[in-house]
Amino acid sequence: MNGWAHHLIIAPILVPMIAAAVLLFFDERKRVTKAMISLASTIILCMIAIILFRIESGPNDFEGVYLLGNWAAPFGIVLVLDGLSALMLLLAALLAIATLVFSLARWHGVGAHFHSMFQLLLMGLNGAFLTGDLFNLFVFFEVMLAASYGLLLHGSGPLRVKASMHYIAVNLVAALFFLIGVSLIYGTAGTLNMADLAARIPQIEPDRRMLMEAGAGVLGVAFLIKAGMWPLCFWLPTAYSAASAPVAGIFAILSKLGIYVILRLTMLLFGEGPSAGFGATVLLWGGTATLIFGTIGVLASQALGRMAGYSVLVSSGTMLMVLGINDGAISSGALLYLVSSTFTISAFFMLIELVERGQDAGANVLTVTMEAYGDGDEDRLEEGEGVTMPGTMAILGTCFAVCGILLAGLPPLSGFIAKFAMLSAMMGTGAIGVPPTPAVWLLCVLVILSGVAALIAMTRVGIRTFWSSLENVVPRVLVIELVPVMFLLSLTLALSVQAGPAMQYMDTTIRTLANPAVYIDAVRNAATVEGWKERTAPGTEGP
C-alpha cells in the first residue's frame, strides 16, 4: 500500500470529525442543510471503507501501518489497517448509512445537534478500530461514549432519560476501569503501543508480569461492560430498547467494539508466550452465562424492544464463548456471525418502530392476557375475518419474518451459514479435526438452543402482531424508513450468496491475528517518510 491509498487510512477519522465540526456552524433551523452534509459525509466514509476493505493485505503482506506526524513507533501515534479493522470499518459505515437515512424521516429533528453527535460517534468508532496504541484507544473510546450519551438522550421522554442516566453511570465506571488498567500496564511495561507491548511481555519479570496482567484484567472489565457480558449487562436491554430507533440501530455495533478490542488484545498480547491463554476461562464461562441470560430474556420478553436488546446479549455471549475456546476454525465462523447478527439486530430495531406504530400498549396487554387465559369467544367467526392483509403490513411482516429467520439461524440466510460454520468446526468436521472438548459441546448445545428460543419468541410475537392483532390500524410508513431496513436485510442475503468468499476472508483474517509476529514487525519496522525529514531537518530551512 502506497501513495494516496496509504493516506486513506486516516480518512475514516478525519471525514466524520470535519463534518461534525462544520455542522456546529449551522443553526438547528437549517435541518435540511445539516442532514445533507451529514449524509454526504457518511456516504464518503462508506466509499473510503469499501476502498480500504478491497485493498488486499494477506497474512504475510502487512503494509497498512500509518505513522501520524511521521514519528516511528513506539514513540508516535500509529494507525493500523488489517483484515479485522477493515471489516469493522465497513460494517460501521454500512450501518451508519442505513440508520442515518432512517433518522431523516423524523428523528433527526426532535432534538439539537443530532448530526454532529452522530458523526462524532463514527469518529470514535473508526478511531478505536484503527488505533495501534492503548492511549489513543482510550481517547477514541471516550469520544464514542460522549457522543453516545447525547444520542441516547435524543428525543427526551422520562423512560429514555432514566435509561440514559443508568447508561451514563455504567459507562463512566467503565471509563474509570479503562484508565486504571492502562495506567497499570504502562507502569509495568513502559509502553502503550500494542505491537511494542506484545514484544515486551515475554521479557517482563514474573512478578511485574503479574501486575501487568492485573492491569490487563482491569482493562478487560471496561470492554466486557461494553460487550455486555453477564453480570455486567443488566443496563443494556433497557438502554437499547429506550433509545430512538436509528440510535438503537447504530448502537448495535457498540457492543461489537468491546468484542473487537478483546479479540485484538487477546490474540496479539496473550496468544502465545508466558501469558498465553490469559483470561480465556473468564471469557468462556462469562460468555456461557451471557448466552444463557440472553436466551432466557428473549423468551421472557413481551415487548419487541427488549427482545431485540436481549438478542444483542445472545450475540455477545456467543462471541465471548468463542474467544474463550480460542480455536481458529470456530473463530472464522464467529466473525461471519458477528457481521450477520449486527446487520440483523440493527434492522430489527428500526423495524420495531414501524411495526409498533399501528399498535396500542393497552391492546398489547390485553392480547397477552388472552394468550394466557383464553377468550371465550375465540371459536366464533368475526365478520370480515380472512380479509387480505394491507400492503404495508405485508411488507413489514415479510421483513419481520426475515429477521426471525436470521436470529434463529434457519436456512438459507447468513445466520444459518455462520452458525453452521461454527457448529461444523465444533463437531470436528472443520479445520480442527480433533474430538470436541466439554466446553465446545456446551457451546454447541447453547448455540442451538438460543436459535430455538429466538424462533419461538419471534413466532409468538409475529402471530400476535400480524395475525391476531386487536386493532385494524395500518401504520403510516415512509419509503425513506422502509428502505434502510430492506437494505440491511439485503446485505445478509448478499452474505448468504457470497458465503464462500466471505468465509475465505474470515479465515484469512483469523490466520493473520493468530500470527502476531506479522503485526509486531510491521508496526515496529514501519518506515518514516525520509523526504519530509530532510525538508524539516535543522539547518535546511535557509539562513
Image: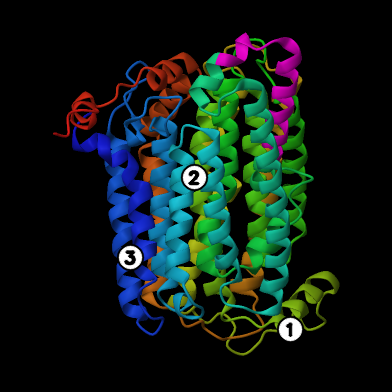
- Residue under label 1: 362
Q: Would residue 417 be seen by someone viewing this image from the given angle?
A: no
**Residue furthest out toward the right:** 373
> Disc 3 to disc 1, how far (Cα)?
38 Å
For disc 2, the marked residue is: 340
* Residue 204 covered by magenta stretch: yes
In the rendered image of this protein, does residue 441 appear above or below residue 458?
A: above
Question: Marks 2 and 3, how far apart in space?
Answer: 24 Å
Which residue appears at 57% of the width and 31% of the height? 263
Q: CA distance from mark 1 to mark 2?
A: 34 Å
Give the colour scheme shown: rainbow
What amino acid type should be assigned to the residue bearing mark 1?
Gly
Tell me the quarter of the picture where residue 78 sits.
top left
Q: Residue 87 in the image: x percent, y percent? A: 41, 38
At 43% from the left and 20% from the top, the residue drawn is 519
What is the secondary structure assignment of the residue under circle 2?
helix
Q: Which mark is residue 312?
A: none
50 on left or right of 159:
left
